[in-house]
Image (tube, rainbow, N blue to C red):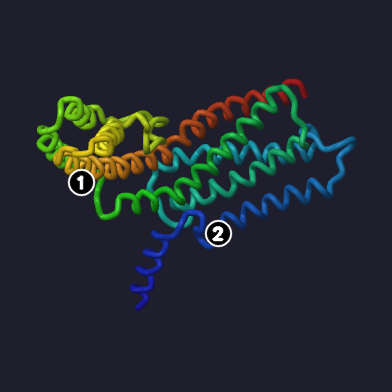
Amino acid sequence: MRASQSVQRRASARHESFLKHAGYRYAWAAGALSAFALLAYVIIDIEPRHHGGSWLGYTLGAISAGLILWLTLLGLRKRAITGGGWSLKGWTSAHVYLGLSLSLIATLHAGFQVGWNIHTLAYVLMMIVILSGLFGVYVYAVIPRRMSDNRGETSSKEMLEAIAAIDRELRIAAQPLPDAFSARIKDAIEKTELVRGPLARLNAQPRSCPTRHAILALRAEIEADADPDDSFGPVVSLLERRRALLLRVRRYARYKALLELWLYVHVPCTFGLIAALIAHIVSVFYFW
């Protein structure tokens, strides 16, 4: 019985979201840390006003700097395999919630003062990193399920194989068509782009899609001709099936791009933040 319960607990932990990890343990810890910082800021009187150079400002600044350095270690942590309280899921959960608390603690450290200097640059980069991280949390919480729903019971490889099968049917079905239309079918088959850059992949229904243009051309011909060729109908039907499959493949590529795209902001800005943080600390103690 105990062994069965242990297995069930481990299975439940595997399916538990990193946001809910250990009963929101790190959400509570981050909330307590934020409450402590806010309470200290409100209760402790600093003359003439709160600022980063006060003893409280230095304390909150040290906490902020420590959090920033610790948060950047997630990339290294992903390369280690451990379980227990500091599993990767637990570390990620702490990364998210302590990152959110950092936005408040660093703001209190600065005393809500900004200017055109290295200190504000570090703060702005920090906020960009936090906001991009929030977007990353959203996509990792929502996109995997959408990817699964879009794919259904079909793998990406199977969808591509289905498109290839339709292409073979199209080549045969398009042979009786006039040259202008068979050329459009050929373009639809040979000029369709599935491997595109990250930004291009965000558009799952590009207006330049040759399959779309072929469908529009054939439908226009059918509507304009009082006695359309019987071979047009089956070709349009195949093209519609092809277009539907292309949409599923492109949606899948779009979701994958969203999972990757935020990192193009998050990671470079993190390195920029570390550099600006070092400059901020050196300048503060050099001119102190």
Q: Which residue is mark 1?
A: 158
Tag count: 2
Viewer-side residue, 124 vs 261? 261
Give the Cα separation between the discs numbered 1 and 2. 39 Å
Q: Residue furthest right?
A: 48
Instruction: Specify the label residue 212 is tagged with.
Output: none
Quadrant housing residue 3: bottom left
Of circles 1 and 2, the one toward us is: 1
Tell me the residue at 57%/29% (across/down): 274
Mark 1 and mark 2 residues within 8 Å of each other at the beta carbon: no
Q: Position of residue 46 (x, y in %)?
A: 86, 40
Viewer can see residue 4: yes
Tell me the residue at 34%/50% (across/down): 150
Q: Position of residue 203 (x, y in %)?
A: 40, 35
Q: Which residue is mark 2?
A: 24
| Residue type, label 1 | Glu
Question: Element under label 1?
Answer: helix
Q: Position of residue 287 (x, y in %)?
A: 76, 21
**Image check: 217 left or right of 271?**
left
Viewer can see residue 160: no
Q: Position of residue 118 (x, y in %)?
A: 68, 23
Could you classify mark 1 by the number of other residues whose Cα lies within 10 Å: few (under 14), some (14-19), or many (20 or more)?
few
Tell me the residue at 49%/48% (across/down): 92
Question: Element under label 2?
Answer: helix
